């Protein structure tokens, strides 16, 4: 499912125009993104938690020529599924 599919689903379920549904999705994703950039944790009950993890720098190899390169430290987004989502995924197994 991509963003267009999600927009269609939200529009149908909520009975709202697709433009408004797309706007709501953009607001939600922008708000989550801004919180993560600010170093905050975003928790949606029974769905999951978005956090930021710190990766340290390390020495890697260029696959084209085998030359060593330094991969810089970086921050990466992490999603951890909540109990409700895990239960839904494993229901009926």
Image (cartoon, helix red, strand yellow):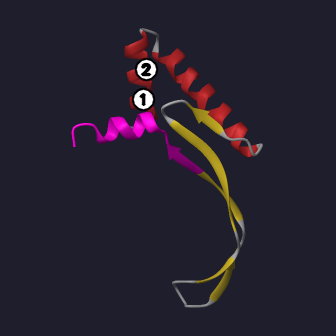
How crowded pointer 2 is (Cα within 10 Å; few <14, some 14-19, many 20+) is rated as some
- Residue 39 appears in view: yes
Cβ–Cβ under 8 Å for marks 1 and 2: yes
Point 64% across, 35% down: residue: 32
Q: Give x and y (percent) for residue 4.
A: 43, 31
Residue placed most toward the observer, 53 or 17? 53
**Residue 31 appears left or right of 78:** right
Indicate the quadrant where residue 74 lies.
bottom right
- Residue 2 appears in view: no
Point 63% across, 26% down: residue: 27
Q: Secondary structure at mark 2?
A: helix
Indicate the quadrant where residue 34 lies.
top right
Q: Give x and y (percent) for residue 91.
A: 27, 37
Q: Residue furthest left?
A: 92
Instruction: Give the position of the N terminus as an image quadrant.
Output: top left
Q: Residue furthest top?
A: 15
Residue 2 lies, with reference to residue 69, above or below; the image says above
Point 73% across, 45% down: residue: 37
Q: Give x and y (percent) for residue 80.
A: 52, 47
Q: Which residues are magenta?
A: 78-93
| Residue 92 lies in the magenta stretch | yes
Q: Which residue does the numbered mark 1 point to in the structure image?
A: 6
Marker disc for residue 10 = 2
């Amino acid at each position: 499912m991509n963003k267009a599919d999600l927009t269609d689903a939200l529009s149908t379920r909520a009975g709202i125009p697709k433009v408004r549904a797309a706007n709501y999705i953009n607001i939600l994703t922008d708000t989550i993104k801004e919180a993560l950039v600010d170093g905050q944790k975003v928790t949606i009950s029974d769905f999951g938690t978005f956090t930021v993890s710190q990766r340290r720098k390390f020495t890697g190899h260029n696959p084209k020529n085998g030359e060593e390169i330094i991969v810089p430290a970086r921050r990466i987004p992490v999603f951890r599924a909540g109990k409700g989502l895990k239960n839904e995924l494993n229901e009926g197994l």
